[in-house]
Amino acid sequence: MVFTARERTLVLEHTFAGSEVTDPLEAARQRAGKYTVRYTLDDLDELLGYVAAEANHAKAKSLQKELDSLFERLREVMESYDDGQWQKPLGSWAAGAPKATGRATLSVVKRKDEP
Protein backbone atom coordinates (compact mmCIF):
# COMPACT_ATOMS: atom_id res chain seq x y z
CA MET A 1 0.00 0.00 0.00
CA VAL A 2 1.39 3.39 -0.97
CA PHE A 3 0.69 6.52 1.09
CA THR A 4 1.43 10.15 0.41
CA ALA A 5 3.09 12.16 3.17
CA ARG A 6 -0.26 13.78 3.99
CA GLU A 7 -2.09 10.43 4.14
CA ARG A 8 0.60 9.11 6.46
CA THR A 9 0.15 12.14 8.71
CA LEU A 10 -3.64 11.68 8.69
CA VAL A 11 -3.32 8.10 9.90
CA LEU A 12 -0.60 8.74 12.46
CA GLU A 13 -1.91 12.00 13.92
CA HIS A 14 -5.66 11.91 13.42
CA THR A 15 -6.75 8.32 14.07
CA PHE A 16 -6.66 6.04 17.08
CA ALA A 17 -5.20 3.19 15.01
CA GLY A 18 -3.28 0.65 17.05
CA SER A 19 0.42 -0.03 16.84
CA GLU A 20 -0.06 -3.08 14.60
CA VAL A 21 -1.27 -0.66 11.93
CA THR A 22 0.80 2.42 12.71
CA ASP A 23 4.20 0.84 13.40
CA PRO A 24 4.80 -0.24 9.79
CA LEU A 25 3.66 3.19 8.59
CA GLU A 26 5.98 4.97 11.03
CA ALA A 27 8.91 2.76 9.99
CA ALA A 28 8.33 3.27 6.25
CA ARG A 29 10.92 5.36 4.47
CA GLN A 30 9.97 8.01 2.01
CA ARG A 31 10.88 7.33 -1.61
CA ALA A 32 9.90 9.75 -4.35
CA GLY A 33 7.45 11.44 -1.98
CA LYS A 34 5.61 8.20 -1.16
CA TYR A 35 5.60 5.70 1.70
CA THR A 36 5.19 2.04 0.81
CA VAL A 37 3.82 -0.21 3.55
CA ARG A 38 2.98 -3.91 3.45
CA TYR A 39 -0.34 -4.63 5.09
CA THR A 40 -2.39 -7.78 5.27
CA LEU A 41 -6.01 -7.45 4.18
CA ASP A 42 -7.00 -7.72 7.85
CA ASP A 43 -4.68 -4.83 8.74
CA LEU A 44 -6.04 -2.78 5.87
CA ASP A 45 -9.61 -3.54 6.95
CA GLU A 46 -8.75 -2.42 10.48
CA LEU A 47 -7.19 0.78 9.14
CA LEU A 48 -10.34 1.43 7.12
CA GLY A 49 -12.36 1.30 10.32
CA TYR A 50 -10.15 3.79 12.09
CA VAL A 51 -10.15 6.20 9.15
CA ALA A 52 -13.95 5.95 8.81
CA ALA A 53 -14.47 6.53 12.53
CA GLU A 54 -12.30 9.62 12.53
CA ALA A 55 -13.94 10.98 9.37
CA ASN A 56 -17.36 10.56 10.98
CA HIS A 57 -16.29 12.45 14.10
CA ALA A 58 -14.10 15.14 12.54
CA LYS A 59 -15.21 18.65 13.46
CA ALA A 60 -13.31 20.36 10.66
CA LYS A 61 -14.88 19.86 7.23
CA SER A 62 -11.49 19.96 5.51
CA LEU A 63 -10.17 17.14 7.71
CA GLN A 64 -13.34 15.14 7.16
CA LYS A 65 -12.97 15.57 3.40
CA GLU A 66 -9.34 14.39 3.46
CA LEU A 67 -10.20 11.36 5.60
CA ASP A 68 -13.16 10.51 3.36
CA SER A 69 -10.87 10.65 0.35
CA LEU A 70 -8.32 8.38 2.05
CA PHE A 71 -11.12 5.99 3.06
CA GLU A 72 -12.36 5.72 -0.53
CA ARG A 73 -8.87 5.03 -1.84
CA LEU A 74 -8.22 2.37 0.82
CA ARG A 75 -11.63 0.81 0.11
CA GLU A 76 -10.82 0.60 -3.60
CA VAL A 77 -7.55 -1.16 -2.79
CA MET A 78 -9.39 -3.60 -0.52
CA GLU A 79 -12.01 -4.31 -3.17
CA SER A 80 -9.32 -4.93 -5.78
CA TYR A 81 -8.54 -8.12 -3.84
CA ASP A 82 -11.97 -9.58 -4.49
CA ASP A 83 -12.55 -12.83 -2.66
CA GLY A 84 -16.13 -13.01 -3.85
CA GLN A 85 -17.59 -11.50 -0.70
CA TRP A 86 -17.89 -7.88 -1.83
CA GLN A 87 -21.47 -7.00 -2.60
CA LYS A 88 -22.61 -4.37 -5.05
CA PRO A 89 -25.83 -2.45 -4.47
CA LEU A 90 -28.94 -3.95 -6.05
CA GLY A 91 -29.43 -2.87 -9.64
CA SER A 92 -25.85 -1.84 -10.31
CA TRP A 93 -24.52 -5.19 -11.53
CA ALA A 94 -25.17 -4.53 -15.16
CA ALA A 95 -25.65 -1.39 -17.17
CA GLY A 96 -29.05 -2.60 -18.36
CA ALA A 97 -30.24 -3.90 -14.98
CA PRO A 98 -33.64 -2.62 -13.90
CA LYS A 99 -33.63 -0.14 -11.09
CA ALA A 100 -35.31 -1.04 -7.83
CA THR A 101 -38.70 0.66 -7.58
CA GLY A 102 -39.66 -0.46 -4.12
CA ARG A 103 -42.55 -2.50 -5.56
CA ALA A 104 -42.57 -6.18 -6.31
CA THR A 105 -43.82 -7.23 -9.72
CA LEU A 106 -45.12 -10.60 -10.75
CA SER A 107 -45.28 -11.88 -14.28
CA VAL A 108 -47.33 -14.89 -15.27
CA VAL A 109 -46.16 -16.84 -18.28
CA LYS A 110 -48.27 -19.59 -19.81
CA ARG A 111 -46.62 -22.68 -21.11
CA LYS A 112 -47.03 -23.29 -24.83
CA ASP A 113 -49.01 -26.50 -24.29
CA GLU A 114 -51.63 -24.74 -22.11
CA PRO A 115 -54.77 -23.32 -23.83
Image (tube, rainbow, N blue to C red):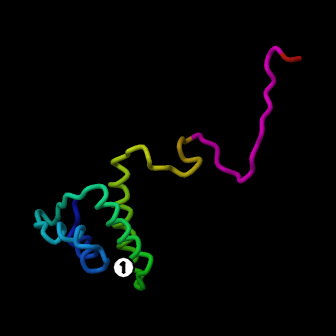
Q: Is residue 47 above or below residue 61?
A: above
Element assignment for label 1: helix
Q: Position of residue 26 (x, y in %)?
A: 16, 72
Q: Position of residue 54 (x, y in %)?
A: 38, 77
Give left or right: position of 113 versus 61. Answer: right
Q: Position of residue 24 (x, y in %)?
A: 17, 66
Which residue is found at the position 77% from the left and 39% from the top?
106
Q: Is residue 8 above or below residue 40?
A: below
Which quarter of the rendering shows the N terminus?
bottom left
Which residue is found at the position 38% from the left and 45% from the top?
83
Reading the image, the residue beneath label 1 is: 63
Q: Where does the magenta region start and end?
A: 96-113
Which residue is found at the position 40% from the left and 70% from the top?
52
Which residue is found at the position 10% from the left and 63% from the top?
31
Is the magenta region chiefly helix, strand or loop? loop
Question: How crowded is the residue under tag 1: few (<14 C-alpha within 10 Å), some, or many (20+)?
Answer: some
Residue 3's image quarter? bottom left
Which quarter of the rendering shows the C terminus?
top right
